[in-house]
Image (tube, grey):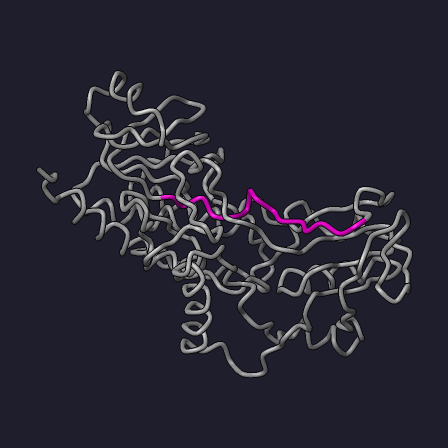
Amino acid sequence: MGRPGRARDVVRHVPDTDVVVVGAGQAGLASAYHLRSSGLDFAVLDADGAPGGAWQHRWPTLRMATVHGIFDLPGMHFTPPPPDEAAAEAVPAYFAAYESEFGIDVQRPVAVTAVRNAGDAGLLVETDKGTWTTRALINATGTWTRPFVPYYPGQETFQGRQLHTAHYRGPAEFAGKRVVVVGGGASAVQLLVEIADVATTTTWVTRRPPVFRDGPFTPAYGREVVAKVEARVRAGLRPGSIASATELAWTPQLLEARERGLLRREPMFDRIVPDGVQWRDGTAQHVDVILWCTGFRPALEHLAPLRLRGPRGGIVVDGTRVVADPRIHLVGYGPSASTVGANRAGRAAVRELRALLAAPAPA
């Protein structure tokens, strides 16, 4: 694992810092807040050029009225802005104020390219701005940079346009188009409704029938959702997202969309043809655009040199601690991949790392 010989030559067994935090979204900032009072030295590295994490990249038409909810970062209340304010402006402004309020010195833009085991010297965190050495690492890179698009036969022959939620910039570019929206999550239905106002036709397809929740989203329901995702990561499976495990809420927007007949779901098509999509029974539909609202995968490529993945494809995590290497904590991963979950996970990760780094080295 890694290149311990080279690392010893470079750092001479003296780490530059106790903890490196990779990412300055909700999970990274929550972790940094708790590190401030931990007695540990730390550095926060973020690949973006400005505060805001993934929120700064959300589509301009995503308004605070349709955001599922932003939980306070620890120690600073998030005052809800006007409902029509763009989420891509409101949330980054809050994150920027938070960094300033607590003096969190985020080094940006710094892109982490690899993390390597350096034996007695700790870990090497290689970036496009140089190399950090650290005794432990909190990874808080989220998922936004890894949009997932499943493969369907004939996909490469499609003569129209394909794009993912991550690249959606608003409904105007779909005016007069025949659009298929793929996906059963909240983003899919939100974009479907937006696009329906300007598109010639919209078709909503999902692999499984979507589930709408009539009752409130109670704390007990939230814990149930988190428990499902946590069970996967404890078993070493690739984590499903919190969003994919959450039922769809009947918002006023979606109630209106149902009345307009926009939420008629079709089963997933079987293949893609040059001018559209085709189902197993031979039914075909002409399509200009396929919008893949099919989620994201954790952005963990830089951890590959550590060989943390198990035989079942995932990284086995106990809480936030990587079982294969307790120096590594994944915050905002699996069950902590939500705003409220990231806050709690950041506190737990710092508590465990403080105990780990204070323990005497084995004789």
Comparing 341 with 330, the one in front is: 330
- Give above or below for 154 relative to 259: above
Dominant secondary structure, magenta: loop
Q: Residue at x 68, y 48 (%)?
A: 164
- Give above or below for 249 relative to 99: below
Q: Residue at x 52, y 48 (%)?
A: 143
Q: Residue at x 86, y 59 (%)?
A: 278
| x and y, in percent, of residue 70 in the image | 46, 60
Q: If the image is split into quadrants, where does the N terminus sit?
A: top left
Magenta highlight on residue 148 = yes
Left/right placement of residue 321 relative to residue 358 reads right
Comparing 279 with 65, the one in front is: 279
| x and y, in percent, of residue 306 in the image | 38, 37
| x and y, in percent, of residue 264 in the image | 78, 73
Q: Magenta part of the protein: which range?
A: 139-153
Left/right placement of residue 115 relative to residue 18 reads right
Comparing 29 with 123, the one in front is: 123
**Can residue 230 be seen at all in this image of the molecule?**
yes
